[in-house]
Amino acid sequence: MPAQLTLALVGCGAIAQLHLPAVRNGATRTAITAVVDTDESRAQAMARRTGARPFASLDAALEAGGFDAVDLMLPHHLHESAAVRCFAAGKHVLLEKPMANDVASCERILAAARRAGTVFQIAENTQYWSEVLAARRMIDDGALGAIITAHASFALPPMPEFYGAGAWRLDDASAGGGIALDAGSHWIRPLRLWLGEVDEVVGALGRPWRPMQGESLVRALLRFRSGVVASLDGLMKDAPFADAPMFRLTGQRADATIDRRGRLVLWDAAHPDGTQLEVAGGGYLESFYAQLADFEAAILDRRPLAAPAEFALGELRTALALYRSAASGRWEKVWD
Ligand SMILES: NC(=O)c1ccc[n+]([C@@H]2O[C@H](COP(=O)([O-])OP(=O)(O)OC[C@H]3O[C@@H](n4cnc5c(N)ncnc54)[C@H](O)[C@@H]3O)[C@@H](O)[C@H]2O)c1
């Protein structure tokens, strides 16, 4: 088994700026040997920072070789073709969420992964977020009592690095939707880690931030297979937001919240005004480190991933069911 993993960074845009420190800090047996971006200046800039060989296209990089794995950080509509080509070349693939914009495309990617027999991971960093995992342990330990409900809430400004003029996210054809399908996965995954699988959803969408074709307002209820109903709220607007926790878990004995700074707070009989819990593991940003460490260990040590790639279908299917619900006005099943 090789002692070192060689990796190509494909797409050197916004999220690559977080994956680079994650490789350096989390995947210490990984060497970045190729960097790819159709925007030559971005590929060159990443090459200068890493010492890797720059390429202007994925095909040119695959042709040249010199890496065992790829980290695909591309606009959503390019995920399928890039992943399928990498699997055909026998590469291990880390693919940013969502796997693709529709389920059929995901099935084709999964089939290509099975044929390759290499490691396939979807980069959903909240799978590794220490406060989310600590809240899961609180549920398991009974600290909150039986869970009654949960609330996930996100409020995003349209940051120029993601939503600037001409950005692919503004266009449904490339983004596949708005904030429910895109950033929403980072709120839906923790809910699934805490409450199990989503059975059905009902909701309404809006577009308060007009430059984006997709939704910039989400109001939804998610009924889990356990019967627990949680709510999901998302909003994007180009103005300040009132403070509100990102997550609230409500149990028969206590509440837990994760506030907008990512702090985990317990609200129980001993702490009716809330007490912040110390959580080892480094918080939200370091979830990216653990994500890259997991990918490396799956390849070099043959360790199972924290979540198989298929698990990421859950966030995509939840968002797509929500889109159907907004059109039908009814509860829509997530998995049928
Ligand atoms: N986990 C998170 O918190 C998080 C945050 C942001 C983005 N993401 C995900 O990361 C992915 C990329 O998003 P982003 O915000 O970094 O986008 P981005 O637009 O900032 O970066 C994408 C890069 O890909 C390059 N590119 C476009 N077409 C290409 C091609 N055919 N071959 C090679 N390079 C090409 C672009 O020039 C750009 O530099 C998306 O799947 C997104 O959902 C995840």
Image (spheres, grey):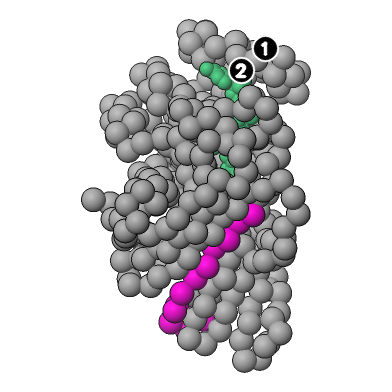
Amino acid on which the number 1 mark rests in the picture = Glu
Label drawn at residue 320: none
Which image quadrant for residue 233? bottom right
Q: Is residue 323 above or below residue 57?
A: below
Is residue 171 rendered to the left or right of residue 202?
right
Q: Report the span colored magenta.
A: 140-155
**Label 1: how many residues lie within 10 Å, few (<14), some (14-19) or many (20+)?**
some
Q: Disc 1 beta carbon < 8 A from ligand 1?
A: no
Say which residue label 2 marks: 37
How far is mark 2 from mark 1, CA to CA? 6 Å
State the image coordinates of residue 205 (x, y, percent, origin top left): 48, 51
Q: Quadrant of ligand 1?
A: top right
Determine which residue is flagged by label 1: 40
In the foreground, 242 or 118: 242
Q: Residue at (60%, 47%) from the top-left corner?
A: 208
Task: Give the quadrant of the N terminus.
Answer: top left
Q: Is residue 33 visible?
A: no
Residue found 68% across the figure and 87% down from its top: 271
Q: Position of residue 298 (x, y in %)?
A: 46, 40
In the image, farthest residue toward the bottom: 269
* Disc 2 element: loop
Assign a secondary structure to mark 1: helix
The type of residue carrying mark 2 is Asp
Foreground pick, 300 / 196: 196
**Position of residue 13 measured from the top left corner of the image (x, y, whole percent):** 65, 27
Say whether marks 2 and 1 touch (CB < 8 Å): yes
Mark 2 C-beta closer than 8 Å to ligand 1: yes
Residue 290 is one of the magenta-drawn residues: no
Q: Is residue 165 visible?
A: yes
88 is higher (above) or lower (below) than 96: above
